[in-house]
Image: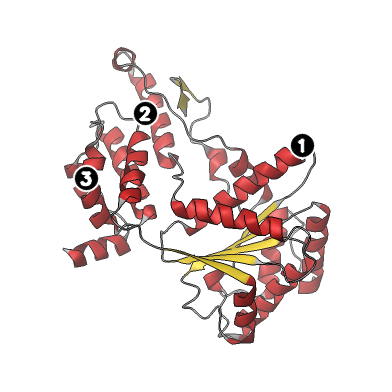
Amino acid sequence: MVVNGEPDSEPGLGDRRDPPTTLQGWRRFVDAEPASFELLPEVQWAALNPAERIAYDEARIDYHSEMVIVATSIVRQVTQQGRLLTMLNRRESSARRGLIVSGAWTTGKSTALKQLGRTHELMVRQRFPGQDRIPVVYVTTPPKGSPRKLAAEFARFLGLPPVKPRFNTTDIADAVCQVLIEARCDLVLVDEIHNLNLATAAGEDMSDHLKYFTEHLPATFVYAGINVERNGLFTGVRGKQIAGRCVLIKTAAFPYRTEWKSLIATLEGALRLHRHEPGTLTRLDRYLHKRTGGMIGSLSHLVRAAALTAIDTGAEAITRELLDGTPVDYAAESDSQGAA
């Protein structure tokens, strides 16, 4: 990255790409400073030799590949509700309340989940400075999973020794719970919860095992998944138990209103291009809504991809023509063509 015009000694932001589903990766995610970059003045930029120009552009590519996390209303709502539940559950010994974030693809569920975890961990560190705690665990629900695979995800996050065939599920779960209780974990984030299918025996078993964790860990559990309320998570006795203990927050495409325009303005303000005309994207707000279907994930992809193309081609600006030639995900493209 280039900050104030100084290239990073190790471009590529490799440490930022470590998965947050491991303790080391999660801590790097929490500790990472927001992406920042200062453009060189025009005279200095023009005077760069070829090697310096390559290094400068590579650093800008790193920056735009990450850019900014936009604090959408969903991110704020999930963070506020999650924090409230952790406080409500602080002295609860059973039947702790949880939170489910549910919605369509690319509507910001995982981003909101991780921002809640990051906010909580930073607050815990401030409250208990110098203590070696693990306040937050972030795991994903394994597809076509089993209780053993789910327990292994928790063990993998903690960096526990590899699960041996002779270890039964309860042994793994008990080891995980022991470590997390000692480490004062009080927030567990479970992403991709739509992989838990209560219509199957394996899904029922995994649900029971997840309930085992909720009963043995003094922590607030927050889940995120694709349209979980429509995919059977709340059906049957197990589903009713989940529904009776969890608050549901729904995510969706952003309507063409003030917040959508604000999201575009935030993304445009984060661009670091030498020839981009400020206000270009905000004037294209309706076009961008049509192209992306109002999906924040699709919008972020389109703007960042266009910025990378502008750097790579030397155009140094995002235009309507450049956006037209920049593909987005198939779902957004299909919706856009259907609305045409």
Kind of residue indicated by mark 2: Asp
Give whichever of 157, 198 is nearer the camera: 198
Q: Secondary structure at mark 3?
A: loop
Q: Secondary structure at mark 2?
A: helix
Give whichever of 23, 313 is nearer the camera: 23
Label 1 vs 3, first from the N-terminus: 1
Q: Which residue is label 2 attached to? A: 57
User: Residue at 66% of width from left, 42% of height from top?
Assistant: 122
Q: Which residue is label 3 attached to? A: 284
The picture places residue 162, in percent across and down from the top left corner, at: 74, 60
Q: Which residue is label 1 attached to? A: 129
User: Residue at 83% of width from left, 60% of height from top?
Assistant: 178
Residue 89 position by quadrant: bottom right
The picture places residue 136, in percent across and down from the top left corner, at: 68, 52
- Residues packed near mark 3 inside 10 Å, few (<14), some (14 to 19) or many (20 plus): some
- Residues packed near mark 1 inside 10 Å, few (<14), some (14 to 19) or many (20 plus): few
Left or right: where 38 falls relative to 316: right
C-alpha gap between disc 1 and disc 2: 39 Å
Q: Secondary structure at mark 1?
A: loop
Label 1 vs 2, first from the N-terminus: 2
Visible in this render: residue 61?
A: yes
Count the marks: how many? 3
Between tags 1 and 2, which lies in front?
1
Kind of residue indicated by mark 1: Pro
The picture places residue 222, in percent across and down from the top left corner, at: 61, 62
Q: Is residue 190 above or below residue 209?
A: above
Between tags 3 and 2, which lies in front?
3
